[in-house]
Image (spheres, helix red, strand yellow):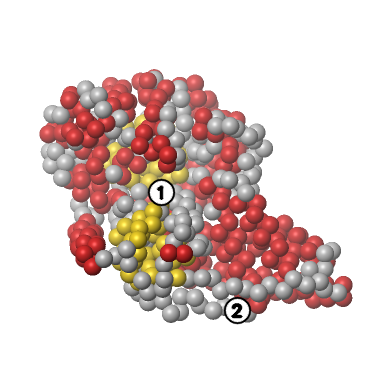
């Protein structure tokens, strides 16, 4: 029996037989052509690209399950339609006299290398997109379309070096147990799709391919981030029991879809959803969420080689607002650092991007881009019930500047005769200690507050949440965090404003009763966790939990807090 550590994309256990999937190697002949063959090769190029674009169009049109990867397939199509792609391939063929296969292989290899060398987890997942498109196009050109899932059975757990977004979809449709990937990250397109489909998947499982054989028994423990290879009989029986319990729990939770999230002592808690990509709206509707408490708009920017236009943003916000209505859609303006946008903005290198130009700061430094997003939101608000929320606010000054820009955007839209609706609630993310301390002043200038616990923990405790070597210092129940949440809630409630928590603490059931006892009005969680958190709310007696609050607030250590809750 062996254990290999990885990073879980979604919680849960999967049990099955290992099936090692090695991508069919394409033989690319690198040869020079004669000048007389240039016209023919360019003609082949146009025909083959048109064929694959039409193939992608058909996939986009026919794909019905929650439409989870439509945008990703669209992005693959855009890679093929990029004028720069056509220009470079034509140059390779006409000037360098490469044959078509060599030209395409060279282009995509160079593109993938660029993204690989950015040393940026938010952009590195673009490599798999380029690999996916290159493989699809070259397979067509070389007429090698072998279905590598042909011999895979339902009880398989696939073992792969890496995975492309479109392949995740194929895996799900085959009803395969799970995926273990040597490379990859939790932020990749592939991971987002797997998570939204509740497909057990571990990534970054270094050394896996060299330690496993086809048909070996395999267990994915997504709750503890590791894979068990050839488990003993007793371990296998233990995990079978865990799997059965998880399935029973999952089936039981489905019965809560139509049940309101009301605590035992009669308090109605608004339970919202966080979404990262537009396609997750289908799952939000399926589980009858009270709305979207956080729509992260970063995907529009970090997954693009160009800035999204106002019109492109408007269409996306409009579509989600229409589907969400009459429930609210809370759109958070772009919340990334300059390091994530360095490919499309001329931003100077920063030694510490987490303490640099990010969140609202990058919006205020790039006002024309910020105004495009604001105008798109104002226009989309005609079609639904939109709220707007601003990240990384450190004090009232920034909020006042933002309100001025919204006013300017409204006037410009009105002057241009463009329909819009400026009647929307404005919210602020509380995720910096200075925002906590001045939350009374901030609450006076907005309509609601939403606590982003992930960053608040990071900035309060000076802990990089992505740095595994200091992960023990990342403590959601550190006394400073408990007191920060309480201070924020008290300051908001004094003037009749509501407070939500949209960070990961809200999605962890062990913290739900604590957050409600601290006075939090709303929770916003990932769609896959919504029913789990709803059950925790229903089982909660806030009055009983509040009786412990004085002792919790006087705790000196995180361990003491955990013991009390």
Q: Is residue 10 left or right of residue 21?
A: left
Which badge, 1 or 2, comes first in the chain's sequence?
A: 2
Neighbours of disc 1 within 10 Å: few (<14), some (14-19), many (20+): many
Q: Secondary structure at mark 2?
A: loop
Q: Give percent across and percent down for residue 537.
A: 20, 43
Q: Secondary structure at mark 1?
A: strand
Residue nearer the viewer, 341 or 384: 341
Neighbours of disc 2 within 10 Å: few (<14), some (14-19), many (20+): some
- In the orientation shown, which residue stands out farthest toward the right? 35
Q: Quadrant of residue 267?
A: top left
Q: Give percent across and percent down for residue 382.
A: 46, 45
Q: Give percent across and percent down for residue 283.
A: 35, 57
In percent of the image, x 60 and y 52: which residue is there? 116
Q: Which residue is mark 1?
A: 275
Q: Give percent across and percent down for residue 436.
A: 37, 24
Q: Which mark is residue 144?
A: 2
Vertical side of 134 occupied by 438: above or below: above
Are the residues tagged 1 and 2 within 8 Å (C-beta)?
no
Q: CA distance from mark 1 to mark 2?
A: 37 Å
In percent of the image, x 61 and y 46: which residue is there? 118
Q: Quadrant of residue 563?
A: top left
Residue nearer the viewer, 314 or 435: 435
Vertical side of 320 occupied by 424: above or below: above
Residue 444 visible (yes or no): no
């Amino acid at each position: 029996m062996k254990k290999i550590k990885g990073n879980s994309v979604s919680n849960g256990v999967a049990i099955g037989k290992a099936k090692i999937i090695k991508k069919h190697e394409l033989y690319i002949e690198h040869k020079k052509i004669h000048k007389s063959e240039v016209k023919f090769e360019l003609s082949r190029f146009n025909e083959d690209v048109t064929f694959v674009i039409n193939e992608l169009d058909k996939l986009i049109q026919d794909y019905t399950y929650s439409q989870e990867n439509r945008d990703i397939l669209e992005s693959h199509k855009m890679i093929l339609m990029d004028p720069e792609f056509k220009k470079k391939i034509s140059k390779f063929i006409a000037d360098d006299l490469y044959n078509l296969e060599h030209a395409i292989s060279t282009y995509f290899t160079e593109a993938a290398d660029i993204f690989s060398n950015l040393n940026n987890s938010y952009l590195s997942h673009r490599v798999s997109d380029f690999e996916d498109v290159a493989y699809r196009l070259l397979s067509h050109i070389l007429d090698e379309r072998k279905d590598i899932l042909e011999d895979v059975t339902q009880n398989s757990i696939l073992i792969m070096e890496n995975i492309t977004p479109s392949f995740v979809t194929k895996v799900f449709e085959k009803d395969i147990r799970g995926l273990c990937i040597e490379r990859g990250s939790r932020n990749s397109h592939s991971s987002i799709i797997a998570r939204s489909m509740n497909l057990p998947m571990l990534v970054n499982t270094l050394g896996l391919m060299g330690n496993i054989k086809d048909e070996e028994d395999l267990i994915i423990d997504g709750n503890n981030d590791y894979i068990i290879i050839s488990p003993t009989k007793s371990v296998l029986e233990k995990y079978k029991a865990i799997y059965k319990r998880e399935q029973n729990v999952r089936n039981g939770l489905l019965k809560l879809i139509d049940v309101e999230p009301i605590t035992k002592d009669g308090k109605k808690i608004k339970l919202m959803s966080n979404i990262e990509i537009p396609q997750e709206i289908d799952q939000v509707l399926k589980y009858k969420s009270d709305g979207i408490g956080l729509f992260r708009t970063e995907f529009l920017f970090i997954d693009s080689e160009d800035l999204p236009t106002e019109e492109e943003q408007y269409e996306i916000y409009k579509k989600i607002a229409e589907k969400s209505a009459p429930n609210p859609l809370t759109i958070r303006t772009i919340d990334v650092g300059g390091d994530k946008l360095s490919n499309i903005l001329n931003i100077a290198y920063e030694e510490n991007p987490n303490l640099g130009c990010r969140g609202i700061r990058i919006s205020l430094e790039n006002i024309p881009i910020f105004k495009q997003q604001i105008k798109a939101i104002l226009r989309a608000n005609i079609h639904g019930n939109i709220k707007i929320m601003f990240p990384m606010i450190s004090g009232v000054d920034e909020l006042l500047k933002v309100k001025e820009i919204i006013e300017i955007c409204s006037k410009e839209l009105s002057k241009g005769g463009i329909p819009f609706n400026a009647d929307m609630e404005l919210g602020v993310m509380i995720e910096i200690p200075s925002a906590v301390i001045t939350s009374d002043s901030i609450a006076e200038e907005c309509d609601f507050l939403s606590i982003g616990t992930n960053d608040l923990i990071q900035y309060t405790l000076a802990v990089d949440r992505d740095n595994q070597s200091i992960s023990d210092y990342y403590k959601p129940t550190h006394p400073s965090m408990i007191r920060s949440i309480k201070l924020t809630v008290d300051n908001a409630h004094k003037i009749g404003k509501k407070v939500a928590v949209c960070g990961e603490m809200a999605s962890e059931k062990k913290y739900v009763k604590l957050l409600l006892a601290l006075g939090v009005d709303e929770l916003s969680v990932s769609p896959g966790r919504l029913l789990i958190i709803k059950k925790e709310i229903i089982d909660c007696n806030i009055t009983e939990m509040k009786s412990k609050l004085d002792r919790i607030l006087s705790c000196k250590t995180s361990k003491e807090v955990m013991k009390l809750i």
